[in-house]
Image (cartoon, rainbow, N blue to C red):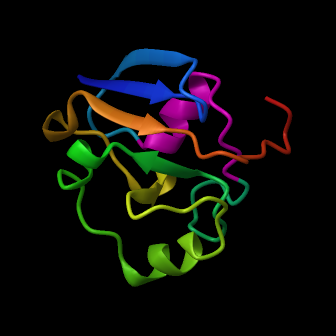
């Protein structure tokens, strides 16, 4: 299991959940009610699942590929610790992962 802490853009709301290893962060976040649209359903054709990974946790992730970097160029409020949630897969190595929702995130599906 992997413990994940989701933090709202303003830091006022924190949700901690346990997720099985091998799950996609986008799916976990959506199941937890986080405001990540994932318009392309995880096909890396949009940037609506952009999250900001805690600086201390960022180095534990595999590096983003060129295609992901290109998609992040289209996201709002990108930081040097930004990633697409559709490209992060849970593992025991990522236990206690902390991710923040970016300011200005939009959920067009109204979840």
Label total for image = 0
Q: Residue at x 84, y 40 (%)?
A: 109
Task: Return the x and y of residue 73 as percentages of the image width and height.
Answer: 58, 76
Q: Residue at x 35, y 26 (%)?
A: 4
Picture quarter with the C terminus: top right
Depth check: 18 or 35 in front? 35
Left or right of 98 on screen, residue 51: right
Is 72 drawn above or below residue 36 in the view shown?
A: below
Q: Residue 25: percent from the left, percent from the top?
A: 44, 41
Left or right of residue 80: residue 33: right
Residue appearing at x 31%, y 26% in the figure: 20
Q: Is residue 89 above or below residue 100?
A: below
Magenta segment: does it hold 81?
Answer: no
Residue 1 position in % (x across, y down):
23, 22
Q: Magenta span covers which residues?
A: 24-38
Residue 76 image position (x, y, % from top left): 67, 61
Does residue 81 appear to the left or right of 14 in the view shown? Answer: left
Q: Is residue 90 above or below residue 34?
A: below
Question: Is 33 included in the stretch rendered in magenta?
Answer: yes
**Quarter of the image holding residue 35?**
top right
The image quadrant of residue 46 is bottom right
Residue 72 location, quadrant:
bottom right
The residue located at (30%, 40%) in the rendering is 90
């Amino acid at each position: 299991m992997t413990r994940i802490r989701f933090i709202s853009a303003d830091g006022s709301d924190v949700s901690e959940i346990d997720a099985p290893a091998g799950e996609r962060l986008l799916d976990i976040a959506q199941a937890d009610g986080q405001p990540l649209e994932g318009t392309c359903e995880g096909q890396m054709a949009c940037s609506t699942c952009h999250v900001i990974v805690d600086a201390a946790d960022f180095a534990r992730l595999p590096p983003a590929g060129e295609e992901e970097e290109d998609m992040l160029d289209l996201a709002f409020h990108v930081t040097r610790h930004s990633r697409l949630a559709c490209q992060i897969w849970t593992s025991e190595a990522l236990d206690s992962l902390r991710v923040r929702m970016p300011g200005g995130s939009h959920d067009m599906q109204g979840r």
